[in-house]
Amino acid sequence: MLIENTLFGERNKVDIAIQRLKEFEPPEGYLLAFSGGKDSQVVYHLAKMAGVKFRAEAAPTPDPPELIRFRRKYYPGVIERKCNTFNNRQAKGRFIGRPKTIFNLIASRKTPPTRLLRYCCDELKENVGNVGDTVLLGVRWAESKGRSKRSMVSFWKGKVCISPIIDWTDEDVWEFLKTNNIPYCELYDQGFTRLGCVGCPLSSNQEKEFEMYPKYKENYVRAFDRMLENLDDKSKCDWETGEDVMRWWLGKNKERQLENQCSMFEE
């Protein structure tokens, strides 16, 4: 519940989160890592309620089309960030270099992303902002054992990360959204519990996701084909086609499920 009765009196989680946002507000304002998922929505609206300065950016990850449409409809002011081959800054209003996507990353890295080789997260998602930025995250302890060890304030690649709803439960998140009549992505009503990259190697439901989004699977296969073309020594490779890589990828990533996995379906 958002309002709890404790031995020390009433505890209002909304007021506490707003106070956190005000307390850590930097002079230049926050950068909010915004996906359009329920947690980033809550942080977005709390920041509005707190009256703090912030800009919201969405990472160029392979999100479900329903989530992309939802984000563009209800949050048109969110910047759809483009990573590029040189840096992540803009020059005279335009991004420099060729935009990175998971598909051209696979071709250039010459290997598929895996549970242990998560270059996609590193280059597309976790490099949000620039050194010195103060980043708002929707990370919560209740999400996983791994995240239960996170602190409200952390440091990552020269940036300060603030998680104002770190102590919120799933029930708190839904109570906030529904109490304030905030629309949310339709996928949650279809059984999705977390919204993330389609085909994520940390997911235990890759095949189910590709059944829902066959175009994404086709794009991955084409990326694997280009990856094979770019290999320096093809004699050391057991794969002949992108389909071979896809079959290996799905089987390899189903071997075990890691803590903090990003499956979008209820287990």
Image (cartoon, rainbow, N blue to C red):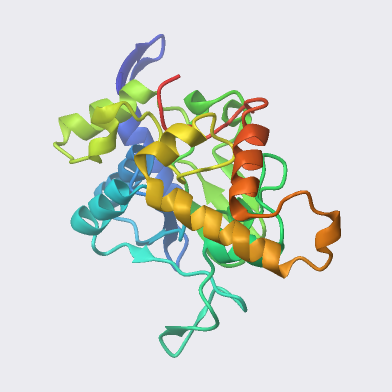
Image vertical order of residue 146 relative to residue 238, above or below: above
- Measured from the top left, where is residue 241 in percent x and y? 64, 55
Q: Between residue 258 and residue 30, name the one nearer to us.
A: 258
Quarter placement of the C terminus: top left
Image vertical order of residue 173 relative to residue 242, above or below: above
- Measured from the top left, where is residue 126 in percent x and y? 58, 54
Query: How many numbered badges does the structure rendering display?
Result: 0
Quarter placement of the N terminus: top left
Q: Residue furthest front?
A: 240
Left/right placement of residue 62 relative to residue 176 reads right
Residue beneath the point at 55% across and 82% down: 97
Q: Residue furthest left?
A: 181
Residue beneath the point at 31% across and 51% down: 65
Write down the quadrant of residue 250 in the picture: top right
Left/right placement of residue 146 relative to residue 64 reads right
Residue beneath the point at 31% across and 35% down: 15
Residue beneath the point at 51% across and 73% down: 99
Left/right placement of residue 167 relative to residue 153 reads left
- Measured from the top left, where is residue 158 in percent x and y? 66, 60
Q: Residue furthest top?
A: 7
Is residue 133 visible from the viewing direction of this image?
Answer: no
- Measured from the top left, where is residue 78 in percent x and y? 31, 62
Is residue 223 visible from the viewing direction of this image?
Answer: yes
